[in-house]
Image: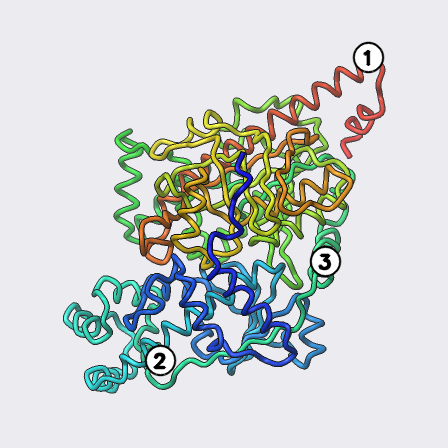
């Protein structure tokens, strides 16, 4: 039994966290510059060159993809939970522009000048945001220094309105002046797009000196935030009463479960192929032909789901309207978060599904006769970050009477596998509570492996729920790896803390070994590898899952939906048998169809 798991494996990480939390207690603004020294000292695996005078392009790309582009013009960052607290502090955020980042789903507003307001759901958003802002400022200021050279000054002066891509000779020239590889420079050019030269001009003009102010951040504030979220959710659902119906809770994303249940991409195959032909996506056309000729291991449905995302994002309103009509036809509700933090919810009523629309991989798990009589719903949330998982699930289990299962699908770092593998843990050490959770994961390798052709499924694994992506270093990982932990992620521990409180009569403990083997509902965790942090300098700032992430995502999602269908069919048969034996209460409810 792993009773001596270290707290974080790094005193430097703990010092860094203590530093910014002590500063956040101030009622005045704090300077990001104050955190630079302790940030560098922690030797983050996501920021391996923090202390080097040379730019760490991987860290800069990682941060740039997860912070809205307006960060280039931002001097002040406000952190809040609900609009009213920011408005009361004198910041009319509802009048500000809503801004987005491609790699992090976090509600953010910009005043159009120099102030950005960020809405958080839990302490984990702070542990994610502050190191990211610090890394961004460090790397900005490195580039600022290098851009003061005569070569760079002359180049930028000659290309002030330049929006086009660099030539090879220009890229080589800039890479040499900025002390980075040409490949790294090209990655920055891709991330910043047509704004690459304008960004360099902004960076050259001044050092970055960002400040930070937390408007609200108490535990009570987080609880109020989830209460507002739930009340808003119930209002938008209208007559769909999820509080008294059997619920299968899923934490995943907003596309895979939906695509598998609606089957829109499968019915629109010809349209999607015409689209990639018209757009000149030769690589995708080659993959499609290989699938058709059985010379590619890829699943055609997975491929079409990937193309669908591109199609819907670039083909105007008509295709999106058709997709929404298909969702409505099968009783699917999309519920955006209108206030505070950004978590979209989807509700699927099982007895409204069109079973001939389902992904073929689901059909062998369907007892259509039983599912058509079911009053159960699938409640899918776009997975929250870190402790946000605890806050959200605590609210859900408080308000929903009949939880049938809790299933979590998400990205993780792997210490013993490769990108695209799927890991199935049954032990989770949570860095927040310092608890080690032991539980029966309802999934095994056999549930996922039939749907994964190019990756490996590893079950009976041990996971660490870390406080943040930047809050890891080689010492941290090696200590846990020595204890047999092979998965690093952020949500499993918080979810299990909430599950503990849903099945036990007290708050989750601290620094204990906790068994959840007797939970009265399914507990299932599936992680797909998106990062291999033991490969120094290699992270999601150096690459993207892109199409490579489609197969493990859908393999995990197929396994999850098959489990739900099998469990619900079994429950319905048991109710039917009970009704036949004269036990009518639940059977009467089912006949009414809720």
Q: Which structural element holds mark 3?
A: helix
- Please tell me which residue is depicted at 65% across the width and 61% down the height of the picture: 338
Q: Earlier in the sequence, mark 2 or mark 3?
A: 2
In screen coordinates, is 189 left or right of 22? left
Marks 2,3: beta carbons within 8 A: no
Q: Is residue 45 left or right of residue 253?
A: left
Task: Give the CA separation, mark 2 to mark 3.
Answer: 40 Å
* Residue shown at 44% from the left, 49% from the top: 309
Cβ atoms at labels 3 and 1 below 8 Å apart: no
Is residue 294 visible in the rendered structure shown here? yes
Q: CA distance from mark 3 to mark 1?
A: 45 Å
Q: Indicate which label's residue lies in the foreground, 1 or 2.
A: 2
Which badge, 3 or 1, is on the more N-terminal residue? Answer: 3
Q: Is residue 138 above or below residue 107?
A: below
Mark found first going from the N terminus, 1 or 2: 2
Q: Which mark is residue 581?
A: 1
| Disc number for residue 203 | 2
- Which quadrant holds the N terminus? top right
Please say whether residue 546 is visible from this viewpoint.
no
Above or below for 503 versus 91: above
Please determine whether, in this image, residue 402 is positioned above or below residue 410.
above
How far from the left and from the top, in percent, is residue 144?
Answer: 33, 80
Q: Which mark is residue 517?
A: none
**Disc 1/disc 2 C-alpha distance (Å):** 76 Å
Of tags 3 and 1, the one toward the viewer is 3
Frontmost residue, 233 versus 78:
78
Residue 476: percent from left, percent from top: 44, 51
Residue identified by numbered label 3:
223
């Amino acid at each position: 039994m792993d009773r001596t798991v270290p707290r974080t494996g790094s005193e430097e990480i703990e010092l860094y966290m203590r530093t910014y939390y002590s500063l956040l207690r101030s009622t005045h603004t704090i300077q990001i510059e104050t955190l630079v020294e302790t940030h560098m000292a922690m030797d983050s695996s996501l920021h391996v060159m923090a202390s080097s005078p040379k730019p760490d392009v991987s860290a800069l790309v990682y941060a740039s993809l997860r912070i809205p582009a307006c960060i280039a013009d931002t001097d002040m960052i406000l952190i809040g939970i609900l609009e009213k607290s920011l408005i009361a502090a004198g910041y009319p955020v509802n009048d500000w522009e809503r801004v987005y980042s491609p790699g992090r789903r976090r509600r953010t507003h910009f005043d159009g000048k120099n102030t950005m307001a960020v809405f958080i759901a839990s302490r984990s958003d702070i542990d994610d945001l502050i190191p990211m802002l610090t890394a961004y400022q460090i790397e900005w200021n490195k580039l600022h220094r290098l851009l003061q050279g005569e070569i760079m000054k002359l180049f930028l002066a000659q290309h002030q309105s330049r929006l086009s891509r660099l030539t090879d000779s220009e890229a080589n020239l800039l890479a040499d002046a900025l002390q980075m590889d040409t490949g790294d420079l090209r990655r920055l050019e891709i991330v910043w797009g047509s704004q690459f030269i304008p960004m360099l001009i902004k960076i050259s003009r001044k050092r970055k000196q960002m400040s930070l102010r937390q408007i609200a951040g108490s535990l009570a504030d987080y609880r109020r935030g989830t209460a507002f979220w739930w009340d808003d959710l119930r209002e938008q659902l209208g007559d769909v009463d999820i509080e008294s119906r059997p619920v299968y809770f899923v934490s995943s994303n907003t596309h895979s479960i939906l695509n598998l249940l609606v089957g829109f991409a499968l019915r629109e195959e010809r349209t999607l192929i015409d689209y990639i032909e018209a757009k000149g996506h030769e690589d995708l056309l080659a993959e499609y032909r290989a699938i058709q000729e059985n010379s590619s291991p890829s699943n055609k449905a997975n491929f079409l789901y990937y193309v669908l995302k591109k199609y819907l994002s670039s083909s105007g309103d008509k295709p999106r309207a058709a997709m929404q009509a298909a969702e409505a036809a099968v009783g699917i509700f999309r519920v955006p978060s209108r206030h505070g933090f950004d978590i979209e919810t989807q509700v699927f009523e099982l007895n409204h599904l069109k079973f001939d629309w389902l992904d073929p991989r689901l059909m062998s798990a369907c007892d259509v006769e039983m599912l058509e009589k079911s009053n159960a719903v699938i409640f899918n949330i776009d997975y929250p970050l870190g402790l946000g998982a605890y806050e959200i699930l605590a609210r859900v289990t408080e308000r929903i009477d009949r939880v049938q299962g809790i299933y979590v699908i998400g990205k993780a770092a792997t210490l013993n596998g490769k990108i695209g593998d799927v890991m199935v843990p049954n032990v989770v050490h949570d860095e927040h509570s310092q608890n080690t959770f032991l539980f029966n994961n309802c999934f095994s390798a056999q549930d996922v492996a039939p749907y994964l052709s190019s990756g490996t499924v590893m079950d009976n694994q041990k996971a660490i729920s870390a406080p943040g992506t930047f809050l890891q270093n080689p010492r941290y990982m090696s200590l846990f790896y020595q204890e047999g932990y092979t998965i690093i992620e952020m949500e499993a521990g918080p979810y299990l803390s909430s599950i503990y409180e849903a099945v036990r009569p007290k708050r989750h403990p601290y620094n204990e070994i906790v068994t959840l083997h007797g939970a009265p509902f399914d507990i299932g965790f599936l992680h797909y590898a998106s990062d291999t942090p033991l490969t120094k300098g290699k992270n999601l700032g150096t690459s993207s899952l892109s199409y490579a992430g489609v197969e493990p995502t859908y393999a995990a999602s197929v396994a999850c939906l098959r489990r739900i269908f099998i469990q619900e069919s079994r429950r319905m048969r048991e109710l039917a048998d009970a009704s036949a034996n004269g036990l009518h209460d639940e059977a009467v409810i089912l006949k009414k169809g809720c």
